[in-house]
Image: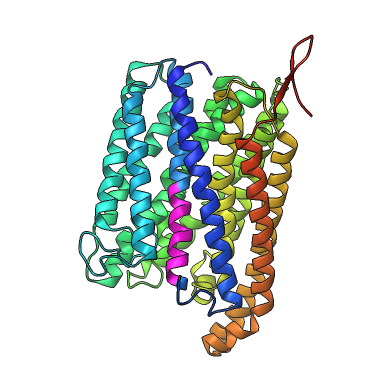
Amino acid sequence: MKYATQKIALAYFSVALALFAIQIVGGLLVGYVYIDPNFLSEVLPFNILRMLHTNSLVVWLLLGFFGAAYFLIPEETEREIHSLMLAYLQLIILVVGTIGVVLTYVFNLFEGNFLLGKEGREFLEQPKWVKAGIVVAALIFLYNVTMTVLKGRKTAISNVLLLGLWGLALLFLFAFYNPENLALDKQYWWYVIHLWVEGVWELIMASILAYLMLKLTGVDREVVEKWLYVIVALALFSGILGTGHHYYWIGTPGYWQWIGSIFSSLEVVPFFAMMAFAFVMVWKGRRDHPNKAALLWSLGCATLAFFGAGVWGFLHTLHGVNYYTHGTQITAAHGHLAFYGAYVCLNIAIFTYAMPILRNRDPYNQVLNMAAFWLMSGGMAFMTFTLTFAGTVQTHMQRVLGEYYMDVQDQLDIFYVMRFFSGVAVFIGVLLLIYALAWPRREVITDDASVPAE
């Protein structure tokens, strides 16, 4: 660890991993409800479990992004973070907000209250006081990292990361706008949901991946930065108007069908470029870095993001196909692999790289960490396949043949059982990962030196 203020990243990573475990437990419970619909229905109804699953996903990913920024910006700018106290204050606000959200959801507190009660918008169900807290935390964060970057060395990695983080914070402001007209509500709702995950989050992903490739492969910074600029340009060109693939059937003008189909089809290009970038950097690399697990997660991130966000997104992005498939399990298949590949793997890659450094140790428990990668990635791939087949059957029976929704759901039981057990594999992988990251191997003292115990 070169800079003392990098240590704040360890606190962010630790909280993020705890929320990650909670998110996966919530996902397992949701998956089991598909098999046994009355499971926990009196204690934790399906809608509450799903809110916990999706909201914890977003929060722990954001905590990972913030922690990654606090870790890499000092190295990129060659100076300490502007204020360590503000960084800890930001984390406290986010943790308090998260606890408030969980209590509000689970106990259904302040139902209908404008300020304190939950809202009914998917992914944005947080009470307004929590949204306000998120904005305050984001402002603290942006001030902290922007002051650091302005006073230090300027690099493409820090500039792109800062652009993505500013975009993330500004677009979240649309979460406060909730018009009564449902079509208008959905139009602006996608400004947050789509322009986050298929816009500014891609900039954050590209910059963190570029940093990892720089450190793990030893490729010249100039080469990494050229790739980074190309990827960013492709992401913004396709991602902004690609929002149109959500506008097909919500009451917006018909021209969005063409704009959405054309530009969202191009969204596969930046993800392919990121995959090519990662493998070319490893191929050209001159460094045999000891942290093989971090490199595995980095390559896995680029590859699974291409398939999950790129290929599976393209499968149902054309409006002629989407007419039949929207809202089916095909959407769930795409969503799971896209989030896992692009952002879950990215966070775990930076955790795996940074945590040994933050603890001033060599990379540890790499075999367990890599085993966790294959368990989690294999489970997620199998889950994606089962949901894709379920969605294909659902589309044909429900949207083509016109059978009733619940009758069709009865025919999908076998897929839901397979999906649940693939989730169990992911959960076991998460436990292995947390153990590998949180509990380093003990060291024993020999006559020669301190060496890791077997």
Q: Which colour scheme is used?
A: rainbow
Q: Which residue is at 55% across, 62% downward?
A: 27
Name which quarter of the figure residue 277 lies in: top right
Give the extent of the magenta segment.
Answer: 47-59
Residue 398: x and y in percent read: 56, 84
Q: Which residue is at 38% across, 44% downward?
A: 95
In the drawing, does residue 200 fall left or right of residue 119?
Answer: right
Residue 376: x and y in percent read: 67, 51
- Residue sticking out furthest to the left: 114
Q: Is the magenta stretch mostly helix, strand or loop?
A: helix
Report whether residue 276 is seen: no
Eyeballing the image, is 122 above or below 453? below
Residue 111: x and y in percent read: 27, 69
Eyeballing the image, is 348 above or below 393? above
- Residue sticking out furthest to the top: 448
Q: Which residue is at 67% across, 53% downward?
A: 428
Q: Which residue is at 53% across, 73% downward?
A: 328
Q: Nearer the viewer, residue 120 or 319?
A: 120
Q: Nearer the viewer, residue 76 or 326?
A: 76
Residue 34: x and y in percent read: 57, 75
Name which quarter of the figure residue 104 lies in: bottom left
Q: Which of 152 and 103 is in front in this view?
A: 103
Report whether residue 54 is seen: yes
In the drawing, does residue 140 fall left or right of residue 203?
Answer: left
Q: How many numbered marks, from 0 up?
A: 0
146 part of magenta stretch: no
